[in-house]
Image: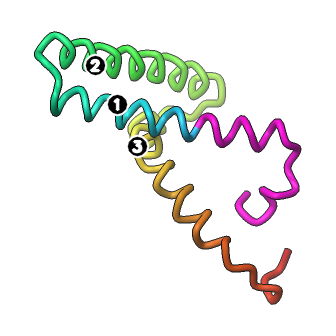
Amino acid sequence: YGSAFRFYPGDVKSYVRWEQGSRILFFLTTICALAVMPLEYKLGALLFVLLRYGIVVWQVRRVARRLGEEGILGRYFLYDLLSPLCAAVLAVTLLRRDERVWR
C-alpha cells in the first residue's frame, strides 16, 4: 500500500487522504469541544462520537457476519483510533526513497 501509493489513480489517492483527514479532524474537534466548550457542546460532541461508533458497529457487524469473521469488532476500534497515526508514520518513512527496496 505505502510504496505503491504513488501509482494509484488520482481519485483513489484523494479518497484515501480525505478519509484519513476527516477522521483526524473529527477526533481533534471532539477533543477540543470536550476540553474548552460549555456543557451543552460537550454533550453534543459525545453524542456525535456515540452516533459515529454506533454506525461503525452496525457496519462492521454486518460485514463480519457476511464474511464469517465474528471476532473483529473490538480490534476495529483500535484500528480506527490508530490508523491515522500509522498512516502518518508510513508517510514519513516513505519520504526517503531507497532504490534497493523491492518494488
Please give left or right for residue 94 compared with residue 60 in the image. Answer: right
Residue under label 2: 45
Who is closer to the viewer here, 25 or 85? 25
Do residues under tags 3 and 2 come within 8 Å of each other at their CB atoms? no
The circle on residue 81 is 3
Comparing marks 3 and 2, which lies closer to the viewer?
2
In which quarter of the view is residue 73 placed? top left
In x, y percent, where is residue 99? 82, 86
Mark 1 to mark 3 CA distance (whole Å): 14 Å
Q: Residues within 10 Å of mark 2 (few under 14, many from 20)?
A: many
Q: Residue at x 51, y 22 (%)?
A: 61
Give the residues drawn in magenta, as a range.
1-19
Q: Quadrant of the N terminus?
A: bottom right
Q: Secondary structure at mark 3?
A: helix
In x, y percent, where is residue 38? 12, 17
Whether 15 is among the magenta residues is yes
Q: Secondary structure at mark 2?
A: helix
In x, y percent, where is residue 30? 30, 29
Question: Nearer the N terminus, badge 3 or badge 2?
Answer: 2
Mark 3 to mark 2 CA distance (whole Å): 17 Å
Please give left or right for residue 20 compared with residue 75 in the image. Answer: right
Q: Residue at x 56, y 55 (%)?
A: 87
Q: Which amino acid type is shown beneath numbered disc 2?
A: Ala
Q: Which amino acid type is shown beneath numbered disc 1?
A: Thr
Q: Residues within 10 Å of mark 1 (few under 14, many from 20)?
A: few
The circle on residue 29 is 1
Mark 2 to mark 1 CA distance (whole Å): 8 Å
Whether 29 is among the magenta residues is no
